[in-house]
Amino acid sequence: MSTLVCFHAHPDDEVFNTGGVMRLAADAGHRVVLVTATDGALGEFPDGILTDGESLAGRRKLELKRSADALGVSRIVMLHYADSGMAGTPENDMPDAFCNADVEEAAGKLAAVLQEENADVVTIYDPNGGYGHPDHIQVHHVGLRAAEIAGTKNVYETTANRDHMKELVKANPNWAEEDNSLDLDTFGLPESEITTIVDVSSVMDAKRAAMLAHETQVGDFGPFLEMPLDTLQQAFGREWFRRVGAGSGLTETSLPL
């Protein structure tokens, strides 16, 4: 049995780019550990969804547990850094925001998990954090350093296939209309830089269940939950990675578990 550690910025980030890989790994008998840097306290959420006295951070912790259960996660670790908010917002300047955390200190916390779990593989984000979110970019830096400290050799940057996304948006122009903040010229990585593609279409039901678990994040998942299964599989039926230290060239394979 091998151990996969997936390092993410906020509750719900685990679903899009590693949800299928986690479920496949768990189904194959491997141990899956999910680490989140922040509690997602600055996320947007629908009016009236929280009960009296309930905090968004508290609700998102419960949602994370439900999502993790759907994806076969054995252990959740929260590093309890403050959510930095979206790029360009005043919260980016908070001293305790994850984007301002000391990389060495944060990497030490993650490295302790990697060593305790004797991790075979760790996933982080690409250098732009997928789409430029400051917490995602920090996950990249912290994750790389943690792997160095822990001696974890198999490090994969989870990302989006920029070329694939451009084709999807071209075929579904309403996506761009719904999210005009998406810059497809910087989103994810070009296919030429991606090393690993994992077909997760067989576990799409689990991935959709994990989306549904994050009830407060309907803004992130809402447009996709109404998609027919074949369209959902087109968008999320494959998960894309760049192996740190590997050469270029796309390979359809699983992570080394």
Image (cartoon, grey):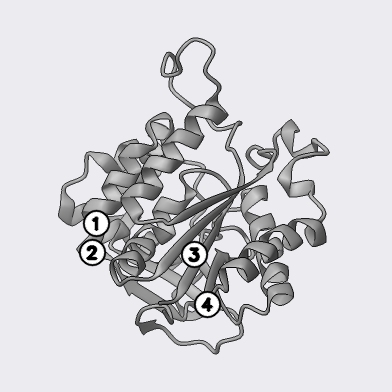
Question: CA separation, marks 3 and 2?
Answer: 17 Å
Please state if 47 lies on the left or on the right of 172 as rendered: right
The numbered dot on residue 204 is: 1
Question: Where is 178 relative to 113, above or below?
Answer: above
Q: Earlier in the sequence, mark 3 or mark 4?
A: 4
Residue designated by label 4:
120
Query: Residue 86's spot in the image, x, y percent?
Result: 63, 39
Local crowd size for mark 2, using a 10 Å CA cut-off: few (<14), some (14–19), many (≥20): some
Local crowd size for mark 4, using a 10 Å CA cut-off: few (<14), some (14–19), many (≥20): many
Q: Nearer the viewer, residue 137 or 168?
A: 137
Question: CA separation, marks 3 and 4?
Answer: 20 Å
Query: Residue 255's spot in the image, x, y percent?
Result: 42, 78
Query: Residue 221's spot in the image, x, y percent?
Result: 36, 40
Q: Earlier in the sequence, mark 4 or mark 1?
A: 4
Residue designated by label 3:
159
Question: CA separation, marks 4 and 1?
Answer: 25 Å
> Which element type, helix, strand or loop, lies under badge 4?
loop
Q: Quadrant location of residue 83?
A: top right
Residue designated by label 2:
201
Query: Residue 112's spot in the image, x, y percent?
Result: 69, 64
Look at 56% across and 68% down and name the residue there. Answer: 117
Q: At label 2, which amino acid type do we have?
A: Ser
> Which element type, helix, strand or loop, lies under badge 3?
strand
> Which element type, helix, strand or loop, lies under badge 2?
helix
Q: At label 3, which amino acid type do we have?
A: Thr
> Which element type, helix, strand or loop, lies under badge 1?
helix
